[in-house]
Amino acid sequence: MSKAVVRSMLYIPGNNPGMIQQASVFGADSILLDLEDAVVLSEKDAARHLVCGFLRTLDFGDMLVTVRVNGADTPFFAEDLRRVVPCRPDAIRLPKCSSPEDVRAAETLLAEIEEQNGMEPGTVKIHAMLETARGIAEAGTVATCSPRVTALTLGGQDLTADMGVEKTREGDELFVARSLVALAARAAGIDAFDTIWADVNDNEGLLEETRRVVGLGFTGKAAIHPGQISWIHRAFVPDAKKVAAAERIVEAAAAAEREGRGVVSVDGRMVDAPVVRRARHTLDMARLVELEVE
Amino acid sequence: MAMLRRPAQAGTLESSDCLVSVAPSETRELDHRGAGATFFAGRTRGLVNDVLDSLGISGATVTIQDQGALEVTLRARLDTALERASREEDAACPRQ
């Protein structure tokens, strides 16, 4: 992948050249060129040509570049993959993954296309989008069914429709699904990306929700408007006290290693390896924000 | 060799885009209007000829209403319009 930390994934409609050509100036860690819901049926062919053209010619810098293709249950799926995969996006976002079989079917096609185009097998990864009740129930097996799967993503709009429940501002109806997705992704050692925040005029709500999902273990969240990116990033910023504590922990761990001591104590509390790892992650997040401010 | 069967269009009149219309013709004719039409006349003519050559299309009327499209956009819209105009099935162009 192009980028180690992907907090934000900006959806860009695949048939909008003005937005695609500006993709790298919005400050997102990742972009998601959308051939699915953002493109009307009559323009699927045009969007495919446009997205492929930009993938071949535009320098997206160090952003992770993914393409959401149309679902396997549509007549556009195979052609989307045939055209897009040779253009080498970092990953394909696979909608409506409800089982490992859905992923394996896509993987077979991806492998064929890569071979036909002289590409290294496994070049294009899969971000499995879980947006059905069955898909959520299968999160663990989907996450581990293929080394191509490098992220699970939650599709909140379709999921709540599938569950027959209302999507609320508080998001209680998604709590279990989010927990399962984050847990499955973390267990598999892959990324977990949360669903969109639909109200582009309510950034406080977006910040609140992003903080909640970060607390559940999500590594990133989708955005539908460039104005949402900084709010998503803000949710990943640790507060000053946590950063200071993390610095003490990492320094103490480094000192213990130098002195050959196995046990580390900071602020009167024993610190073990997972705590040190978490402290390093906290410092990484803090540094990322410093870099953006600079 | 592709054969143009009917007129077709692709693209939009939004900023940074272009609307490309193509139609079967005995000869090649290009009508390039809009932002940058004069400044990029050579580039656009070269691009249109390249695309038509690569598809083996000897005759076509191509009209481009340019709203400040990058070359990559122009090429994508032209490819789409030509593909729609060449399809065997009907309803190749939803705007017509």
Image: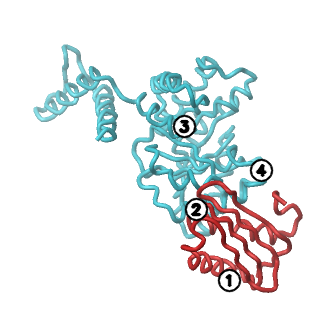
Chain colours: A cyan, B red
Give the residue pinned by disc 4: A41
Q: Residue at x 40, y 41 (%)?
A: A5
Dot 3 crowding, Cα within 10 Å, few <14, some 14–19, many 20+: many
Task: Tell whether A147 sits left or right of A39.
Answer: left
How far apart are the two marked residues, 4 and 3, measured between alpha carbons?
Answer: 23 Å
* Dot 1 amino acid type: Asp
User: Which residue is more in the foreground, A190 or A68?
Assistant: A68
Asked if badge 1 and badge 2 are on a common chain, one would say: yes
Residue A197's spot in the image, x, y percent?
58, 30
Q: Earlier in the sequence, mark 4 or mark 3?
A: 4
Asked if badge 4 and badge 1 are on a common chain, one would say: no
* Dot 4 amino acid type: Leu
How far apart are the two marked residues, 4 and 1, measured between alpha carbons?
Answer: 29 Å
Q: Chain of mark 4?
A: A
User: Which residue is more in the foreground, B33 or A63?
Assistant: B33
**Circle on res. B68:** 2
